[in-house]
Amino acid sequence: MDKFNGVIKYRAQGARNGIEILIVGAIGLVFIMLFNLLRPGEISILEIFLVSLCIVAVFIGFLKTQEPYYSLLLSKSELIYYHKYGSWSVSHSNFRQSGIPKVEDGLDYLELNAVGVKINDIDEFLENIAPRIAGKLLIEQRNLFMQVVQKHCKGGNCPSEWLMEDTQYTSPQGIGYNGLIAMFANRAKNLQLLTGFDLILPASVLDKDIWEFSANLNKWKREPCQFIASHINN
C-alpha cells in the first residue's frame, strides 16, 4: 500500500516480484545454455528440466509485469479497481457497504476468498464500465461465482440464468443494456441475490487480509476524509 497526493493505492499480491522472477529465469536460462555449449556431450535430463523451469519463470514473470502496478485506488470520492484490460469505479455516494461473501453449507458457511461490495445504483456503475473489462471479469471471476451457485444447487436444480448470463438486462430504473454489459449486470444481480453483494474483489488483487480490507472500506464509507487522512499520516 502506498499513500500520497490524498489517495491510498494498493498493489495486488499476484502482481508482485514480476521483474525479479523474469530476470532470475532469464539469467538461469542463459547460464544453462552457455554451460551446455562450453562442455562436450549431449544435454542431460537435468539440464532439460532446469531449462524448462527457467522458461516457465520467464513466462510467469512476463505475465506479472503486464498487470497494473496498482490494483486499487481509494480517494475521498471513489474506489477504483485497475485491471490490465481496463478499470471500474464506485463513487463514495454509490458505495453502500463491504463484507466477505458467504453462503450456507449445511450447518456451516462457505466464505469466498474475496471482498464483496454492495452498491446503491447499478446504473451509475454500468455507465462507467467498458465491455472489454466486463467480459474479462465475467471469465476470471466465474470460478468464485460457481462456488456460490454449487452450494445452492446441491439437488441439481439450478436456474438457467445462474449458469449462463443473459445478453439482455433491464435495470430497476428501466434502463436497458445488452451484450457484455448486460451479462455483467445479470451476474451482479445473481451475485446480489445469492450473497447480498453486487461486486467482488478477489483476494489476489489485495495487498492485505480480506477481513481487514473489508473493514477499511466500511470505515472509508463512514468517514472518507478522516479515513484517508489518518492512513496517509500514519
Image (cartoon, rainbow, N blue to C red):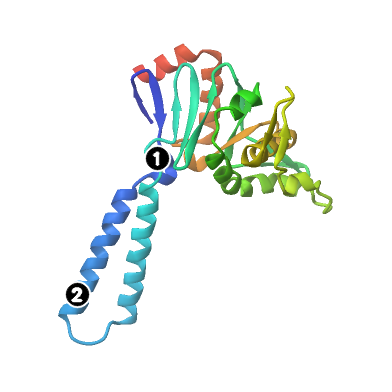
Does residue 234 appear in this view? no
- Residue 195 occupies quadrant: top right
- Badge 1 element: loop
Q: Amino acid at mark 2?
A: Phe
The residue tagged 1 is 68
Give the mark nearest the N terminus, 2 or 1: 2
Q: Quadrant of the N terminus?
A: top left
Q: Position of residue 83 (x, y in %)?
A: 47, 39
Q: Is residue 146 left or right of residue 160?
A: left
How many residues crowd mark 1 within 10 Å: few (<14), some (14–19), many (20+)?
A: some
How many residues crowd mark 2 within 10 Å: few (<14), some (14–19), many (20+)?
A: few
Q: Position of residue 57 (x, y in %)?
A: 35, 60
What residue do we see at 64% from left, 27% from top? Answer: 118
Q: Nearer the viewer, residue 212 or 139?
A: 139
Q: Is residue 225 left or right of residue 171?
A: left
The residue tagged 2 is 35
Of the two numbered discs 2 and 1 in the rendering, the one whose residue sits closer to the viewer = 1
Q: Which mark is residue 53?
A: none
